[in-house]
Image (cartoon, coloured by chain):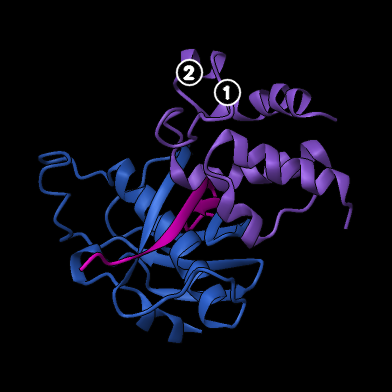
Chain colours: A purple, B blue
């Protein structure tokens, strides 16, 4: 799965958690989950759990800590997909 | 099992836990009896005291989320990046509750909580409240975190 494909699926994962539907439509690798998408910071945990189910991966504390913008999320997800535990 | 109550940060008028009757890493059961002289009955409603939904929610959060969360943290189910200390306090991050029955002064309510997950410092639970007649009073999903005081 390439970065574009991960991004389009990630959009679906993020959709239930953001009030900024316009920002979500224009999402790119620089989009910040909290500042731009106005996601409740505690809901980042739910996004990680949903992403784990969506991509069938496991995200640990170190990886989770990096996931504050879309590009970082894609980095973590693509690394985990290509290197199954 | 009531030993856990000493960790609760609430005092007097805002402490809504009397007893913990069951507690393990997957859930908790506890009870609270509404005091007829509680500060909210005088005005909610004048001459017609009914427990506010927000207080029902608080009772469910204190027993179902805070007691279980503190238990998980002090019993050694440690997670990196989170810690509980003197300056810590619990924060409710989301809740959605349905109410089925009214609760009147002096009623005893029992709260049962089942853990859905505890990850990255966030606890999410399915919480139910029953009255003394074992009727369902309220049911909902609660999530919270432990926040360290900003100094």
Q: Residue at x 45, y 20 (%)?
A: A20
Q: Is residue A11 left or right of residue B70?
A: right
**Residue that badge 1 annotates:** A28
Q: In the image, is residue A5 above or below residue B38?
A: above
**Residue that badge 2 annotates:** A23
Task: Give A73 or B67, whichever is nearer the viewer.
Answer: A73
Could one spot residue B28 in this view of the protein? yes
Q: Quadrant of the C terminus of chain B?
A: bottom left
Q: Residue at x 11, y 43 (%)?
A: B43
Chain to which the residue tagged by mark 1 belongs = A
**Residue B150 falls inside the magenta stretch:** yes
Query: Which quadrant would residue B75 be assigned to in this image?
Result: bottom right
Q: Is residue B53 left or right of residue A33?
A: left
**Residue B103 falls inside the magenta stretch:** no
Chain to which the residue tagged by mark 2 belongs = A
Q: Position of residue A40 (x, y in %)?
A: 44, 39
Q: Position of residue A24 (x, y in %)?
A: 54, 19
The residue carrying pointer 2 sits among few (fewer than 14), some (14 to 19) or many (20 or more) residues within 10 Å by Cα, namely some
Secondary structure, magenta segment, majority class:
strand
Q: Which residues are magenta?
A: B125-151
Q: Which numbered dot is residue B15?
A: none
Q: Residue at x 66, y 66 (%)?
A: B26
Q: Is residue B151 left or right of residue B20?
A: left
Q: In the orientation shown, which residue stands out farthest toward the bottom?
A: B3
Q: In the image, is residue B150 above or below residue A14?
A: below
Could one spot residue B125 in this view of the protein? no
Q: In the image, is residue B11 above or below residue A16?
A: below
């Amino acid at each position: 799965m390439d970065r574009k494909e991960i991004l389009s699926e990630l959009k679906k994962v993020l959709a239930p958690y953001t009030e900024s539907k316009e920002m979500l439509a224009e999402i790119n690798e620089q989009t910040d989950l909290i500042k731009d998408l106005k996601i409740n910071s505690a809901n980042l945990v739910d996004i990680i759990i949903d992403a784990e189910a969506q991509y069938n991966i496991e995200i640990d504390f170190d990886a989770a800590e990096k996931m504050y913008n879309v590009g970082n999320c894609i980095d973590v997800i693509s690394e985990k997909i290509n290197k199954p535990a | 099992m009531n030993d856990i109550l000493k960790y609760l940060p609430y005092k007097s008028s805002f402490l809504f836990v009397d007893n913990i009757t069951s507690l393990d890493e997957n859930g908790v059961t506890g009870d609270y009896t509404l005091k007829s002289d509680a500060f909210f009955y005088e005005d909610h409603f004048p001459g017609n005291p009914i427990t506010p939904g927000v207080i029902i929610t608080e009772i469910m959060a204190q027993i179902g989320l805070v007691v279980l969360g503190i238990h998980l943290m002090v019993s050694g189910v440690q997670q990196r990046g989170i810690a509980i200390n003197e300056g810590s306090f619990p924060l409710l991050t989301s809740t959605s509750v349905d109410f089925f029955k009214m609760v009147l002064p002096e009623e005893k309510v029992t709260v049962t909580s089942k853990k859905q997950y505890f990850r990255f410092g966030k606890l999410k639970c399915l919480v139910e409240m029953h009255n003394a007649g074992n009727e369902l009073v309220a049911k909902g999903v609660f999530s919270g975190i432990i926040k360290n005081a900003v100094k």
